[in-house]
Amino acid sequence: MAIVFKGRVFSVEVETVRLPNGRAHEMAIVRHPPSVVLIPMTDAGHVILVRQYRHSVRRDLWELPAGSLDPGESADAAAKRECEEEVGLVPHRVDRLGGLYPTPGYCDEEMIFFRVSDLRPPPPDSPHKPDEDEDIHAQTFGIADAKAMVARGEIVDLKSAYGLTLIP
């Protein structure tokens, strides 16, 4: 195994793998820490989406709030922190809905989905702010409206399209 790239968010390793058929194959694997995907629900039964610029696709996207776990951080703690950083509200109820691997052919990242609710303003001295490279705008939508945004192609982020299916 050789690390061929190490960035702030992920690294890339190349290793030789022996396949079940006996052949050796060189594989590049993106090593990415687990992440959380939030489904923030208001008391009125609406969902909060965030809009942010994604340079890799060179456009603004509507998404469910999400972010990587910090080293040693639990998924529940990351869900609470990311909600405060990206939505500006602290969830007092955090329900883990399950996890999945969005690109297991080349990446080991697991995305863990949470419904977060009972949202309240953070304390004035809270250290949780958006990351320096984030310019995020949160907006509340009716559930049917958010799901219609997927159907119209206004939400093109796969984790968000999937996460919205978890809302009854």
Image (cartoon, rainbow, N blue to C red):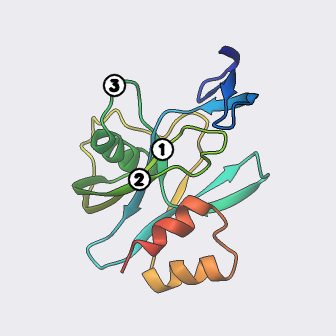
In primary-sequence order, the first of circles 2 and 3 is 3
Which quarter of the figure is the C terminus placed in? bottom left
**What label sits on residue 99 in the rendered view?**
2
Q: Is residue 70 visible?
A: yes
Question: Which of the two discs, 2 and 3, sits closer to the camera?
Answer: 2
Query: Do callouts 1 and 2 mark residues in contact (Cβ within 8 Å)?
Result: yes
Kindly identify which numbered label has been placed on residue 110: 1
- Residue 13 appears in view: no
Q: Residue 116, position in %: x, y?
A: 30, 59
Q: Give the SS element for disc 1.
A: loop
132 and 82: which one is in front? 82
| Position above or below: 63 against 15 | below
Residue 168 against residue 6 in the figure, above or below: below
How many residues crowd around disc 2 within 10 Å: few (fewer than 14), some, or many (20 or more)?
Answer: some
Three-letter code for the amino acid on which mark 1 is drawn: Glu
Query: Which circle, 1 or 3, is nearer the viewer?
Result: 1
Q: Where is residue 133? Give x, y as percent.
A: 61, 36
Q: Which residue: 65% across, 23% down?
A: 7
Residue 12: image x %, image y %? 68, 25
Q: Are marks 1 and 3 in contact (CB under 8 Å)?
A: no
Compute the Cα span from label 2 to label 3.
Answer: 18 Å
Q: Residue at x 35, y 40 (%)?
A: 78
For the N terminus, the quadrant is top right
Q: Residue at x 61, y 76 (%)?
A: 150
Q: Which residue is mark 3?
A: 72
Q: Residues within 10 Å of mark 3 (few under 14, many from 20)?
A: few
Q: Count neighbours of disc 1 (C-alpha within 10 A) and say few if under 14, some if 14 to 19, many if 20 or more.
A: some
Q: Amino acid at mark 3?
A: Gly
Locate residue 19, reporting x and y percent.
67, 34
Badge 2 marks a residue whose secondary structure is strand
Query: What is the C-alpha distance between the residues marked 1 and 2?
Result: 6 Å
Instruction: Inspect the image, locate mark 2, and give the three-letter code of the amino acid beneath it.
Output: Gly
